[in-house]
Amino acid sequence: MALHEDMEKIAAQEGELRLPRFDAQIAWELGARLRDMAAERDYKLAIDVRRIGQPLFYAAFDGTTPDSAEWVRRKSNVVARFHRSSYAVGMTLHLKTTTLVERYGLPVADYAADGGAFPLFVKNAGFVGSVTVSGLSQRDDHNLVVEALCAHLGRDFAALRLGPEGA
């Protein structure tokens, strides 16, 4: 799939995967779903679900390192700043042949425009937080979060997932 097609698909994901409400219980359900999915597939991930400025769920598997938590923090900072998925922000920067540092002056120590963090929007309320995973390829991290949101919302993941890179 071409980069522009991926960008259109991610915009559709961000538009469609909106929660009816968000609270600590929903954060726990999303985080636990991601943890179960990762355990079933033997993924070594760090998982974070947060309300703006407030972590509500965090889990890390054996095989992750303290750097995994840093990747989660840096990716979720991108979502908090732009209200877009970290993967979409990274693709946009790639298309414009620039970086977060060059375009926005954002330090790489605090921001990572790599896939795996996804904005949480509540219908009729707007941006409320993010869900982030780190440990797979950035495309696979992104797709895993989308899959979990689809399962939570009863949406068809096959229709919303990004296909294999370069397909």
Image (tube, rainbow, N blue to C red):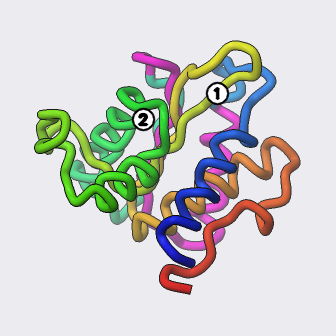
Mark with earlier residue (2, 1): 2
Residue 144 versus residue 125 in the image, above or below? below
Element under label 2? Answer: helix
Disc number for residue 79: 2
CA–CA distance in space, label 2 to label 1 = 11 Å
Which region shows up in magenta? Answer: 28-54
Task: Determine the image quadrant of residue 55.
Answer: top left
* Image quadrant containing the N terminus: bottom right
> Where's residue 107, x and y in %?
12, 37
Residue 76 versus residue 142 in the image, above or below? above
Q: Please tell me which residue lies in front, 21 or 13.
A: 13
Measuring 36% from the left and 27% from the top, which residue is drawn there? 81
The amino acid pointed to by label 2 is Val
Q: Please tell me which residue lies in front, 149 or 7.
A: 7
Residue 124 versus residue 29 in the image, above or below? above
Disc number for residue 121: 1
Measuring 60% from the left and 57% from the top, which residue is drawn there? 8
> Where's residue 87, x and y in %?
43, 54
Element under label 1? Answer: strand
Task: Determine the image quadrant of residue 164.
Answer: bottom right
Left or right placement of residue 56 versus residue 67 in this view: right
Measuring 44% from the left and 58% from the top, which residue is drawn there? 45
Extreme residue toward the right, this view: 154
How packed is label 2: few (under 14 Cα within 10 Å), some, or many (20 or more)? many
Left or right placement of residue 96 versus residue 140 in this view: left
Q: Please tell me which residue lies in front, 66 or 143.
A: 143
